[in-house]
Image (cartoon, rainbow, N blue to C red):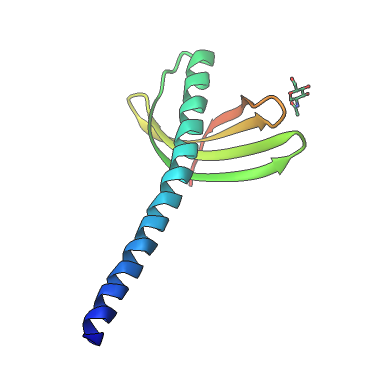
Amino acid sequence: MRRECYVVCLLFGLSITATMASRKEASGGLIAGDLAQFAVTVHNKQSDDPLKLLAVNNGFTQVVSGGINYKIILLAVDGLTKQYQAIVFENHSQNSRKLISFIPYFS
Ligand SMILES: *[C@@H]1O[C@H](CO)[C@@H](O)[C@H](O)[C@H]1NC(C)=O
């Protein structure tokens, strides 16, 4: 009886941990994916080199005066698949985004 409870409780605990971990990852991934898509869309408007976003490989945030800078390492394809580093500034007071830079990234 006690042993059963132990197993059930352990499984219950594990499933909660797994749910929390996947939630956290999902929301972080969602924000990064959204910003990466924004960066690629703006880049495509500014150049003759239309890219298609494939994946977000990494993301960093930096609090700066007036908002947040997001540095995103992403994978995109224009025939060739390459890594890019995009920096997106998000203005706190206006809730607006601006693409600061978009350059090839070599790791
Ligand atoms: C953020 O947006 C506001 C409102 O348009 C503007 O006055 C301010 O200069 C912006 N801040 C930065 C850091 O771009």
Q: Which residue is depicted at the point 52% across and 20% down?
A: 42
Q: Where is residue 95 in the image (x, y as percent from the top left)?
A: 64, 27
Specify whether 103 is left or right of 54. right
84 to 98, vertically: above or below: below
Report whether residue 24 is seen.
Answer: yes
92 to 4, vertically: above or below: above
Point out the image quarter for the N terminus.
bottom left
Q: Which residue is depicted at the point 36% across and 56% down?
A: 19
User: In front here: 91 or 60?
Assistant: 91
Q: Where is residue 24 in the image (x, y as percent from the top left)?
A: 45, 51
Q: In which quarter of the image is residue 37?
A: top left
In the orientation shown, which residue stands out farthest toward the front? 1
In the orientation shown, which residue stands out farthest toward the bottom? 2
Specify whether 60 is left or right of 41. right
User: In front here: 50 or 28?
Assistant: 28
Picture mark count: 0
User: In front here: 20 or 52?
Assistant: 20
Q: Where is residue 18 in the image (x, y as percent from the top left)?
A: 35, 60
Q: In which quarter of the image is residue 68?
A: top right
Q: Which residue is depicted at the point 61% across and 44% down?
A: 61
Report whether residue 57 is seen.
Answer: no
In which of the image's four quarters is ligand 1 placed? top right
Specify whether 6 is left or right of 40. left
